[in-house]
Image (tube, coloured by chain):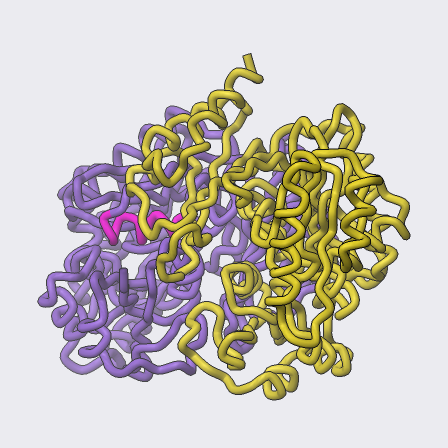
Chain colours: A purple, B yellow
Amino acid sequence: MNVLVLGAGQLARMMALAVKPLNINIRAFDVGSGNVVDPLSTNMTFGNLTQGIEFADFITAEFEHIDHQTLALCQASGKLRPSSQAIKVGGDRRLEKDLLVKCDVANAKHKIIETKADFDQALNNLSFPLILKSALAGYDGKGQWRLKDKAKAEDVWLDIKAFFDGGEHGVKHAVVAEQMVPFDREVSLVGARDSQGNTVVYPLTENHHTNGVLSVSIATKVDEVLQAQAKKVFDSIATELNYIGVLAIEFFQIGEQLLVNEIAPRVHNSGHWTQQGADTCQFENHLRAVCDLPLGSTELIRPSAMINILGEDEVPNEILNVASTTLHWYGKSKRAGRKMGHINVSGNSEKQLAARLSLLADMLPEAAFEELTPYVKVFKNKLT
Amino acid sequence: MNVLVLGAGQLARMMALAVKPLNINIRAFDVGSGNVVDPLSTNMTFGNLTQGIEFADFITAEFEHIDHQTLALCQASGKLRPSSQAIKVGGDRRLEKDLLVKCDVANAKHKIIETKADFDQALNNLSFPLILKSALAGYDGKGQWRLKDKAKAEDVWLDIKAFFDGGEHGVKHAVVAEQMVPFDREVSLVGARDSQGNTVVYPLTENHHTNGVLSVSIATKVDEVLQAQAKKVFDSIATELNYIGVLAIEFFQIGEQLLVNEIAPRVHNSGHWTQQGADTCQFENHLRAVCDLPLGSTELIRPSAMINILGEDEVPNEILNVASTTLHWYGKSKRAGRKMGHINVSGNSEKQLAARLSLLADMLPEAAFEELTPYVKVFKNKLT
């Protein structure tokens, strides 16, 4: 089976490693160079997009910010899973919010802003503080503004207006204003849906961010009520999109209520722990869905965590002495803040996991993993 | 880090997949073609052996039947781990038996046969039944004779003589005659030793063979006494060889006594279950040892089994419905009896593992997996 992945980053790389044993061969379309490459050896070129589409039995994507012409070409081939519509929803907060409303799933009160009038309306109808996010651009905390009260509103508007004016010609920009939610924690649900409509979801994962970028994810025993609530949202959204593949949903948890923050139509950083903590990892399950193979069990094997390596191209080798610790480099060149790799670690109990996380926190340089030590303390305290 | 593997089969392939996340790049020397290839895409050629040695920070091997000139070249580079001496021991039963005697580890009473006089002496000094194995040629049941009593001795000798005469010119052939041991079961110990002399071993694995080829391996809870006995043998042999990397030892178990059957200076088929059943898999631990990284924990995560796929290039997709089942194809073309892939499966308890094995046995074609159903019955009975 041959699969073309749109995007040639770490997610395509981990897909390729996960499904080579299933005799699924992955090639990746590098949107930057326009070349189809081997995701495990990106200097190996196989031609252009047309040739990549020709090669593939199925086409999928590792990210949602793909130009619409490429998506249209892939959709026209009949091989694209999930559909271009689903991928676009992930790349445009306007479509995303429309979908959430359509599916009647709880999310933060919001307003789409394209003009000064929209902006003023948002100020009047929503409660402060607000978070304003670009509808189209990036993720990981880029293109975002926070507004505590009306005092700074004019400054923020000027900044947003400059952002609109500086945007790509011909693209209609927008910003989504949301009431900031005083959430207890951020969790995400990663799951898969196949072409028959079957769905499976992994246990809810707790996520911690550093400067808007995921730094630690942890999957422990499941709160059945919360899990059922999240699964219902997953099924509703995945069914509406007639989705095929892995889909991730980020939530804010407030008490026992989950509000959808955003959705990602792809394998997700908060699901990397499944590489060793779940019966079937998210990368394999994504390709199982895409290639019409049975979905694999998503059961948690044992409490597991993932630590992102941001902006560093080495970590002390001694971390490999900590039992069950695996190190995943993405083979990328170093750049400040860049996702360079991750560390997975598991324990036979939450207590053992906490102890191992504690050992890792002591070994990893504090400057690059600043929030790890405080987080581990909180996790340990919760267990006692 | 760059590593050259001597041999370009499934073991090199699984090494490459296991350590790509550690940024260790594996190339493989295909002894058949004389080309250095990408083990994940064997039509990709990187040059000849000299260029492969040049490329490598370290060199290792996926099998022991490598011509001595190649081994000498690699040894001279100072990069070969384990040493050519250790690899040769695995490829020559004479050296292997000498090593076992030197290390004073229990093994079957035996006699090395190079002449008719040796053969006659074996008949007189050993008890029937005997098994006679070529000292040099292959494994997996090839080049073997069984002798129940003296009646057929002359026939077997003529066969062995023909084998000697038909052998490679200039190579001194031999056969090792062993007393056949009325063993209770066959087990193996896979472990790793690093350049500092640290050793780690996986739990003893129970092995079942079909026509002399491994068909099922199973790793469950450890018998501490037996495990300690096996670990002592491992340490003794690995230290004697100043071994670096993964080493496998096959034993016959008779009551509470382990007799060494043979050793394999490499990752081993009976260790494939570690890909999902152990904290660190054998492929990663081999490369960790070779590349001077800390050895990883060998703890059993949960009861696990491996089923070899022999001579088949497809199995029913429905097996992927069985929780925790993973399928590993080697990307090889079909040939009768050939090791084409394997299936790993785990359970949270031995009972759950037995139930899952039972489901798999029902789904897999009986002709190709003839001993699976009877074996699963025996395993289930032991649990009740």
Q: Quadrant of the N terminus of chain B?
A: bottom right
Residue shown at the point (54%, 39%) measured from the top left? B209
Residue A381 seen by the camera? no
Residue A1, quarter of the rendered image: bottom left
Depicted A15 relative to depicted B307: above or below: below
Q: Which of the pair B202/A200 is nearer the observer?
A: B202
Depicted A57 relative to depicted A347: above or below: below
Q: Give x and y (percent) for residue B224.
A: 77, 29
Depicted B241 relative to depicted A251: above or below: below
Q: Which residue lies furthest to the left in this view?
A: A76
* Left or right: B135 as drawn, with respect to A88: right
Q: Look at the image and say whether residue A286 sits in the magenta stretch.
A: yes
Q: Give x and y (percent) for residue B354.
A: 48, 25
Q: Give x and y (percent) for residue A194.
A: 23, 44
User: Which region shows up in magenta?
Assistant: A281-292
Residue shown at the point (34%, 64%) measured from the top left? A25
* Left or right: A336 as drawn, with respect to B86: left
Residue shown at the point (39%, 52%) measured from the top left? B336
Q: Give x and y (percent) for residue B159.
A: 61, 54
Q: Look at the image and say whether residue A184 sits in the magenta stretch.
A: no
